[in-house]
Amino acid sequence: MATVREGNRPVMVVVDVQVGVMKEAWEAPRVIGNVARAVERARSEAVPVVWVQHSNHELPTGSAQWQWVPELVPAEGEAVIHKKYNSAFEQTSLESELADLGATHIVLAGAATNWCIRATAYGALDRGYDLTLVKDAHTTESMPLEGGVTIAAEAVVQELNIAMKWLEYPGLKNDAASANDVKFAVPGGSR
């Protein structure tokens, strides 16, 4: 069982809102706007914002694809975590950064829903953080499968929103809330 973290210190974590990740993502302009809205709200409520940036063969460090989308840029003093795996926790400094901030509640947004957002959400819960997924501030691409079947990006987003609303961990609170409705001061973000 994960250790339940005492207190209530929210931190906004923005994952992989990078040019190459968002290029073909479902409703990218709307989602980017909602991530920006959530970040603005976090900053206005003095909630720290931590940025996570992925690199791999498709997103080589320093390349145009690796850069943040122009609408979203970390502010001076906000932490930037570099990762190579889906979960923002794996072989990164995210946990130590969150510890330095006294984080107990993660408000999560970004991309891609079915890979890095899902892995980071479960990683946060497994490590004892309360979690709020910003349900209109994450996205992915549709997934073509063998046999001509495609899983629509919208369905992937909806499924994770439902999972984060109904998933239960002992002693933790988790939920999904819109960028306009997320309550940073409430563990789980909306209940």
Image: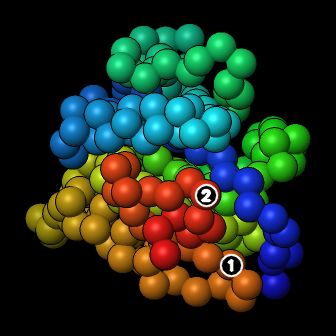
Q: Looking at the rendered structure, which numbered label has been put on residue 57? A: none
Q: Nearer the viewer, residue 14 or 89?
A: 14
Q: Residues within 10 Å of mark 2 (few under 14, many from 20)?
A: some
Which comes before the other along the chain, label 2 or label 1?
1
Locate residue 146: give its quadrant. Answer: bottom left
Choose between 68 and 143: the one closer to the eye: 68
Please report the residue visible at 67 percent of the width from the left and 52 percent of the height from the top.
10
| Left or right of 172 in this view: 59 | left
Residue 172: mark: 1
Q: Tag 2, which secondary structure?
A: loop
Describe the element under mark 1 as helix, strand or loop.
loop
Q: Residue at x 62, y 67 (%)?
A: 187
Q: Nearer the viewer, residue 95 or 24?
A: 95
Residue matched to label 2: 185
Left or right placement of residue 85 versus residue 73 in this view: right
The quarter of the rendered structure image containing the N terminus is bottom right
Q: Compared to 128, does 67 lie above or below?
A: above
Q: CA distance from mark 2 to mark 1?
A: 15 Å
Measured as percent of width and height from the top left, residue 159 is found at 32, 72
Instruction: Indicate the position of residue 82 as horizontal and vertical percent values.
Output: 68, 30
What x and y, as percent, mark residue 190? 47, 68
Report which quarter residue 5 is drawn in: bottom right
Pointers 2 and 1 in contact (CB under 8 A)? Answer: no
Q: Is residue 73 above or below residue 34?
A: above
User: What color scheme is it?
Assistant: rainbow
Amino acid at pointer 2: Ala
Q: How crowded is the residue under tag 1: few (<14 C-alpha within 10 Å), some, or many (20+)?
A: many
Label 1 is placed on what type of residue? Leu
* Residue found at x 22% / y 32%: 29
